């Protein structure tokens, strides 16, 4: 069952570095005000009284900053605010995002006592050259150490990855994926790098020293990466930045593979690769009907029916109908002449 996540954004708070690509205020549409117990309580009360709140299946998430680089007193204040709601069973736990180089035993113990169950690490890349060019301030070894520390302490571990950073290539990023698979995290997110106004990456782009991935390149790279991760039993829980009112304002995203349905584009591409061997050879049929599991028909059709256009181009046939067939297993289609 999908978790109901109640996010509390702490934009850039605790961050010891200003990464080349980052502007958390625009990404989250949250101004960089100092988050304290009172503001967290306000967010929680609004959430738990919402009709969409799923009591017992909900998690409180601190996103957008480096949680474990906050002062320990602030960490305790924020976690203590959530504690009564955990005790009432309204939340099953807390998740936080942080940097790989911002963990120590004291902070691990604070999180453990405070009900944190999941820690997501901003790994971004496992290539030290890419990390250096992106002003991350940590190394791949830091990421390896952090995953091991968290796993040993009993936390569920997520990794956040970012293809298309300066110095990155398709081969470099797929090497990152292979190294991440070796670490065996519990989940992953993949966010292709975007050029956001006012960032260091924007200045590089405007000077002609950085070229972002195209949308097609990013979709293909993420499809391959997601396939490798999930084959290794590491679920990819999100691909592409979530839209926010500030982020999508005109002039905020200067360049890069932004798409409102990026994750769906990737999943549709993965599905096409899966069904391609099941399509008839080009020119063998003229008009066809395709049957598939009802659950996979959206993937078959693709974004704005791009999937059907692709099938037509592959087969040379006109797709007259797409129909559900619950006798078919996932990943299987039946193509019939009409």
Image (cartoon, helix red, strand yellow):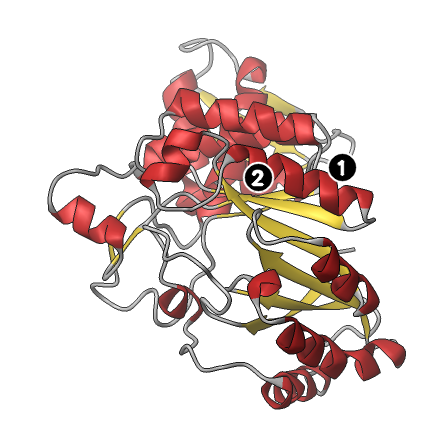
Residue 272 appears in view: no
Instruction: Give the answer, above or below, for where 114 lies relative to 180.
Output: below
**Circle 2 SS class:** helix
Number of the label disc, if any, that sits on residue 203? none
Task: Indicate the position of residue 148 as horizontal and vertical percent values.
Answer: 72, 38
Mark nearer the N terminus (1 vs 2): 2
Structural distance between the alpha carbons of marks 1 and 2: 47 Å
Rendered residue at 73%/31% (across/down): 233
Task: Indicate the position of residue 320 as horizontal and vertical percent values.
Answer: 47, 33
Left or right placement of residue 2 versus residue 271 in this view: right
Of badges 1 and 2, the one in the foreground is 2
To which quarter of the image does residue 84 belong? bottom right
Instruction: Give the answer, above or below, for where 209 lies relative to 82.
Output: above
Location of the N terminus by quadrant is bottom right
Residue at numbered disc 1: 326
To which quarter of the image does residue 215 belong? top left
Task: Indicate the position of residue 298 as horizontal and vertical percent values.
Answer: 56, 44
Task: Indicate the position of residue 256 as horizontal and vertical percent values.
Answer: 29, 45
**Circle 1 SS class:** loop
To which quarter of the image does residue 310 belong? top left
Q: 122 or 54: which is nearer to us?
A: 122
Left or right placement of residue 76 versus residue 16 in this view: right
Q: How many marks?
A: 2
Number of the label disc, if any, that sits on residue 142? 2
Rendered residue at 56%/13% (across/down): 277
Instruction: Give the answer, above or below, for where 69 lies relative to 230.
Output: below
* Mark 1 burial class by Cα count in 10 Å: few <14, some 14-19, many 20+: few
Rendered residue at 45%/29% (across/down): 127
Q: Residue furthest left?
A: 207
Q: 294 or 223: which is nearer to us?
A: 223
């Amino acid at each position: 069952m999908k978790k109901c996540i109640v996010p509390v954004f702490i934009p850039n708070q605790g961050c010891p570095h200003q990464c080349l690509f980052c502007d958390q205020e625009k990404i989250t549409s949250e101004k960089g005000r100092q988050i304290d117990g009172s503001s967290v309580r306000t967010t929680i009360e609004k959430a738990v009284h919402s009709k969409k709140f799923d009591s017992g299946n909900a998690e409180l998430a601190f996103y957008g900053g480096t949680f474990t680089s906050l002062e320990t007193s602030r960490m305790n204040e924020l976690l203590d605010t959530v504690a009564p709601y955990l005790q009432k069973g309204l939340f099953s736990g807390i998740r936080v995002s942080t940097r790989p180089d911002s963990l120590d035993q004291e902070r691990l113990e604070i999180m453990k006592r405070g009900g944190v169950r999941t820690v997501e690490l901003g790994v971004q890349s496992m290539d030290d050259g890419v990390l250096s060019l992106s002003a991350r301030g940590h190394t791949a070894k830091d990421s390896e150490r952090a995953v091991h520390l968290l796993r040993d302490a009993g936390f569920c571990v997520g990794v956040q990855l970012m293809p298309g950073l300066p110095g990155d290539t398709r081969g470099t990023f797929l090497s990152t994926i292979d190294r991440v698979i070796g670490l065996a995290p519990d989940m992953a997110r993949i966010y292709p790098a975007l050029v956001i106004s006012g960032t260091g990456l924007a200045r590089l782009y405007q000077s002609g020293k950085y070229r972002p991935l195209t949308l097609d390149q990013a979709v293909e790279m993420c499809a391959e990466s997601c396939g490798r991760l999930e084959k290794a039993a590491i679920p990819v829980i999100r691909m592409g930045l979530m839209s926010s009112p500030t982020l999508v304002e005109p002039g905020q995203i200067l360049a890069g593979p932004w798409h409102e349905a990026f994750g769906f584009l990737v999943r549709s591409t993965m599905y096409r690769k899966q069904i391609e061997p099941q399509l008839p050879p080009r020119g063998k049929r003229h008009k066809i009907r395709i049957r598939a599991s009802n659950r996979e028909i959206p993937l078959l059709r693709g974004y704005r029916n791009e999937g059907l256009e692709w099938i037509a181009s592959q087969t040379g046939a006109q797709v007259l109908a797409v129909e559900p067939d619950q006798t078919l297993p996932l990943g299987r289609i039946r193509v019939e002449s009409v």
